[in-house]
Structure formats: structure tokens, C-alpha cells
Amino acid sequence: IIAFLAYLVGLSRQISRIVEEGARYRYGQTALNRALAQALDAADASNRAKTRFLAAAGHDLRQPMHSMNVLVAALSFKALDESAREIVSVLDTVNQTITRQLDGLLDISKLDAGTLVPAMETCHLDELLQAYFEQVRLIADEKGVLCTLSVECPLAVRTDEALLKRVLSNLTDNALKFTPRGGRISLALKRRGDAALVVVSDSGIGIPTDQHDRVFEEFYQVGNPQRDRAVGLGLGLSIVKRLCGLLGATMEMHSVVGEGSRFSIGLPVTSVPEASPRHPVLKRNPMPSKAVLVIDDELIVRQSMRLLLEELGYTVHSASGSIAAKNIAAREAIDLILSDMRLADGDNGIEAIAQVRKLRPDARAVLVTGDTAPERLREAQNTGLTLLHKPVTLGRLLEVLDA
């Protein structure tokens, strides 16, 4: 009995230690979970703050950039001497560089907002690559980089052609940025089983192995410690990865420092290819009798749009908000409304367009916005109106005017 009691005492002490250790572990896990939850909340708050900052900065930068693009476009229609035309050309190049960077912020905002919905249709990759190659080859020739195209066989896939072109554009832009003069980049189309592979490769600087995952993070760049704006913001590969997920495409990367990089985009081959879609060619057909109403709360934007549209032969009216726009519509014929999304004093372009259409129901309407905030992008998309993003290029504006 004494021996058994001694055994029970020893056993109870051992169980007591186990219970104490379990309690300490449990309370420790609770404290750790609480700290982790707080860290996640802080990270989430930081991410929301980043989104709000990018949206505000994107909007504020797009307003003057939109005016600059429009004024440069208006100048391009003037009779200029050789020196002045060269200045306009350089200014246009600078504008386009900044516009591409702002477009990257807009793409991220669209993806965050969930407003980027792919329009899936049959796409003939061989034709798409051939047309895209002709554009890239010209740029590569200017930079002294050899650009080649290899198509193994004609292939058709179901995808969003515009978004796939954006993927290709980001990959080839990176290839051209990081490939020195005398190097090469190549585009290739291959079939591997039931998949079509679009491959973009280069002989550039390559990516260190320990940074292969990080290059897909937003705002991360390899080989740009000085944050040279000429090589972008570090959004290209982040957008590529997210667009591939949206399109249901696979993506693989192989890169070696000093040898270059290769990106392979995989898409399921369409079993029954449809006829290749033929896109109508838009022709310039300005009609001076048409009247355009420009609605924007910023005077410089109204002035720059008026100068360009008058140069194109249109009659232009401008208003700063809904009330002024309604008053103009009451006395003037309006064929097209170009309205900013966010106006002063709580007013907005959606309301302004509605007010004008009460008086001019046949007027076409286009919503123009510099906003990149996800909630505002969703609101604009839900109107069903044609949506243009500032800064609007001359080519995109002409497409809308022609349509």
C-alpha cells in the first residue's frame, strides 16, 4: 500500500506538470494569436491607407497630365517649324512615360476593385503575336536590340485579347528595359500537349535566384536602387501575375543572372477554333456641326479640351457642374457629353449627365475619370456609360469621337 501510494504521488506530480505546461502553452498561444490578429489588422489598415493614398495621388496627378496630353495633341495639329515640332515630340514622349506609370497604378486599382472582368472569346495566338511583334520590333530596332518571332504552329485559345496583350506588353517592356544594346529578345508560340505556350525571353541582366518570388510584389524592382523613373514603378510583373490568374493562364519564370530571363504563359488550346474576328477599321470623320459639352470642375481641363476639340472642328461648350451643364443644354443643342466623374461640392458626372439628358435625350455620353479608388471605379462601371481614364490619349479620344 505504501509503495502504491508513493507511485500515485509520483504520477500525480507528473500529471500536474503536464497540466501546467499545457496551460502555459494554451495561454501562450492565445497571446500569440492576439498579437498576430493585431499585426494582421495593422497590415490591413496599412494596405487600405496605401490604396487610399494611391487613389488620391493617382487622381491628382491624372488631372494635370490629362490637360498636358490634350494640349500636346492640339499642338500636333498646328503648323510648326522643325525646332518646335521636335520640342512637341519630346514633350509627348515624356507624357507617355508618365501615362504608362499611372496606367500601372490604375491596373492595380482595377484588380483590387474586382472591376476588371475578362471578355473571353476565341483568339488566334499566331495572328495576335505576329501583329504584336511588328510593334515591338520597331521599338527594339531603335534601342539596338534584336527582336525575333518563332511560331511553331497556328493555335487558338479562349481568352481576353486586350488583357493578354497587356501581359505581353509588360513582359516585353521589361525585356527591353533590362537588355543592353546588342542583346536580343524573342517571342515564341509553342504547343505542349493541350496547352499553348507564349514565351517571352531576353538576354538581359537576369534576376538573382533569391529574388525570383519578390519580383512579383508590387513596387519591387531588381537593379534599380536609385528608383530611376525611366524603368517604371515596379508594377509590371505584379500585374502580369494577377492578370494571368484572371485569365486562367499559367505562368513560369526561368532567370539566371547575366544570361537573361524567360517567361512562359500557358493557355488551354481551343478544341474547335472559330473564325478569326475581324475588327472594323475606324476612319477619321470629323463633323464640325456636332456639339460637344465638356463638364469638368477644373478650368485648365475645360480650356485644354476646348482647344483640342475646336482644332478637330467641333463646336464646344463647357460647364463646371450639373447646374451649369443643365443651363447650357436648355439653350444649346448637345450631341456628345464628356464629363468628369468627380466634380466640386459633392457634385458628380453621373448626375450632370442625367440632368443634360433630361433636356437632350439623344445626346451620347462619356464618363472621364482620373480616379483609381476601387469603389469609384465600381460606381463608374455600373453606370453602363463609356468610360475613359485620364490622361486620355489622342488616339483613344478620336476612337470615341468617331464612334
Image (cartoon, rainbow, N blue to C red):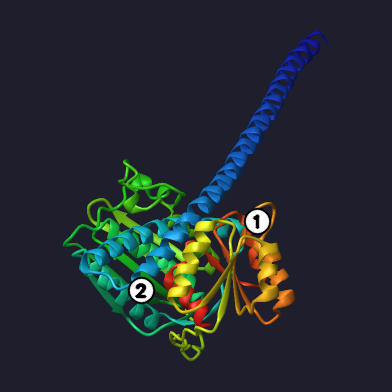
Question: On screen, 314 above or below 80?
Answer: below
**Residue 61 versus residue 73 in the image, above or below:** above
Q: From what the image shows, is residue 31 above or below residue 194?
A: above
Q: Please, which residue is most extreme toward the right here?
A: 1
In this rendering, the label closer to the viewer, 1 or 2: 2
Measure how far apart labels 1 and 2 are at the Cα level: 38 Å
Dot 2 amino acid type: Phe
Badge number at residue 100: none
The local secondary structure at tag 2 comes to loop
Of residue 275 and residue 278, the one placed in the foreground of this image is 278
Please name the amino acid that badge 1 sits on.
Glu
Using residue 208 as the reference point, say whether residue 283 is left or right of it: right
Q: Residue furthest bottom?
A: 275
The reply, left or right, for residue 212 in relation to residue 378 is: left
Residue 146 at least partly seen: no
Q: Which residue is mark 1?
A: 375
Q: Position of residue 313 (x, y in %)?
A: 46, 79
Please identify the quadrant where the N terminus is shown.
Answer: top right
Instruction: Name the residue at 23% across, 69% down.
Output: 81
Residue occupying image coordinates x 42% and y 59%: 68
Taking 113 as reference, is 62 left or right? Answer: left
Secondary element at tag 1: helix
Residue identifier under label 2: 77
Residue 160 showing in the rendered view: yes
The count of marks equals: 2
Which residue sits at x=32%, y=60%?
A: 91
